[in-house]
Image (cartoon, rainbow, N blue to C red):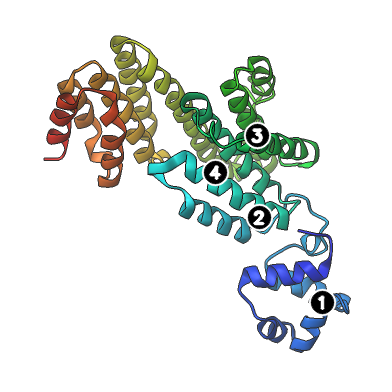
């Protein structure tokens, strides 16, 4: 997004899907006037600035190019839809390279939309795993070096200029993974230590609900406080789920069977207790699908098809047919073929 109102009117009009005539009709001006604005020949009357911004779904600051990260959500959502369309589960690293090339073009057109920078860097971080484990891109000249160098350069821009803490945290997270896979553990540690930590008891959530209670008065403020508390526990639940996911992945791939199963059984009990609260059930299927995969992988790797079947039966009511197919595809390479087929036959009955 460049700092010219003419370019922004044209850009956001197209994002909204308006013709010049349609935008003109909504503003009470002629199509020729809109055409002149977009060509940079003239400027809209100041009385039209707010109506133009409202019709285009942006702020006036965005219209004038004065916001760095407040990019039109509709445009970002369209980019994310295209990313989903380009992603291929069966060819993950190759499709992520295609996505990076696509995002690079979007960034050139929107050089102050820092969320696009972060999406780009996150895909580069994903590719770094395949470069590390599978020697991906080793026969592609300097393709990987150019990608990671460009990603790190764009990460520096986000950390220097963005005001959105979430975007900056996502940058540190992605860079930590890039450096882990490059075996540069000192740099990885620097980015990890820049992330928020639950070691501090001074979290926003621990005091924000109290602010609402005092601000609204103890009786009147309690209703709003209850809403805040429910929302905050949703965030805590997601954080616990993510922590379990990352740690269970380590157990399932690298620990002995007994340790992994013990961790899995404990984590299922923790999440079952949390999901017993109605307001926290939104992400149940995601957790149970991941849990089932890690437990099945643990048992099948040890040649124990019956244990894998028993684990699946514990959560099968939460596993959709699509998720079941993904689990089967992912565990197939983790065990002997005959062990896999015992598991497959039982859960597909």
Give how far apart the Cα atoms at labels 3 and 2 are. 18 Å
Q: Which quarter of the figure is the C terminus placed in?
A: top left
Give how far apart the Cα atoms at labels 4 and 3 are. 11 Å
Residue indicated by mark 3: 148
Task: Mark 2 or mark 1: name the one nearer the start of the chain.
Answer: 1
Q: Of the numbered discs in the image, which one, if any, rests on residue 97?
A: 4
Q: Is residue 144 left or right of residue 284?
A: right
Label 2 close to label 1 by CB (< 8 Å):
no
Residue indicated by mark 1: 39
Residue indicated by mark 2: 106
Q: Quadrant of residue 147?
A: top right
Q: State the residue in front, 50 or 307.
A: 307
Task: Mark 4 or mark 3: name the one nearer the start of the chain.
Answer: 4
Q: Quadrant of residue 41?
A: bottom right
Task: Mark 3 or mark 1: name the one nearer the start of the chain.
Answer: 1
The residue that appears at 26% across and 40% down in the rendered structure is 324
Task: Mark 3 or mark 2: name the one nearer the start of the chain.
Answer: 2
Q: Residues within 10 Å of mark 4 (few under 14, many from 20)?
A: many
Q: Nearer the viewer, mark 3 or mark 2?
A: 3
């Amino acid at each position: 997004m460049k700092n010219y109102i003419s370019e922004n009117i044209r850009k956001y009009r197209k994002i909204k899907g308006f013709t010049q005539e349609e935008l003109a009709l909504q503003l009470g001006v002629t199509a020729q006037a809109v055409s002149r604005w977009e060509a940079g020949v003239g400027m809209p009357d100041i009385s039209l600035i707010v109506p133009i911004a409202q019709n285009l779904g942006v702020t006036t600051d965005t219209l004038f190019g004065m916001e760095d990260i407040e990019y039109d959500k509709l445009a970002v959502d369209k980019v994310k839809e295209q990313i989903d369309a380009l992603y291929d589960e069966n060819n993950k690293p190759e499709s992520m390279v295609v996505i990076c090339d696509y995002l690079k073009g979007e960034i050139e057109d929107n050089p102050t939309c820092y969320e696009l920078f972060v999406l780009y860097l996150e895909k580069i971080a994903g590719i770094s795993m395949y470069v590390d484990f599978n020697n991906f891109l080793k026969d592609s000249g300097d393709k990987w070096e150019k990608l990671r160098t460009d990603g790190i350069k764009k990460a520096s821009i986000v950390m220097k200029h963005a005001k959105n803490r979430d975007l900056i945290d996502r940058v540190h997270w992605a860079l930590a993974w890039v450096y882990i896979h490059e075996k540069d553990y000192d740099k990885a540690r620097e980015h990890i230590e820049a992330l928020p930590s639950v070691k501090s008891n001074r979290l926003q959530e621990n005091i924000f609900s109290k602010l609402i209670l005092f601000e609204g008065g103890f009786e009147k403020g309690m209703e709003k406080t209850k809403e805040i508390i429910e929302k905050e526990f949703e965030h805590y639940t997601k954080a616990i789920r993510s922590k379990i996911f990352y740690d269970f992945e380590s157990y399932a791939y690298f620990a002995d069977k007994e340790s992994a199963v013990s961790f899995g059984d404990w984590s299922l009990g923790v999440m079952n207790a949390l999901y017993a609260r109605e307001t926290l059930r939104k992400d149940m299927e995601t957790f149970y699908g991941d849990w089932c995969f890690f437990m099945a992988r643990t048992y099948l790797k040890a040649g124990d098809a019956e244990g894998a079947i028993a684990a699946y039966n514990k959560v099968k009511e939460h596993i959709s047919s699509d998720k079941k197919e993904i689990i089967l595809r992912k565990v197939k390479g983790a065990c002997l073929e005959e062990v896999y087929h015992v598991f497959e036959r039982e859960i597909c009955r």
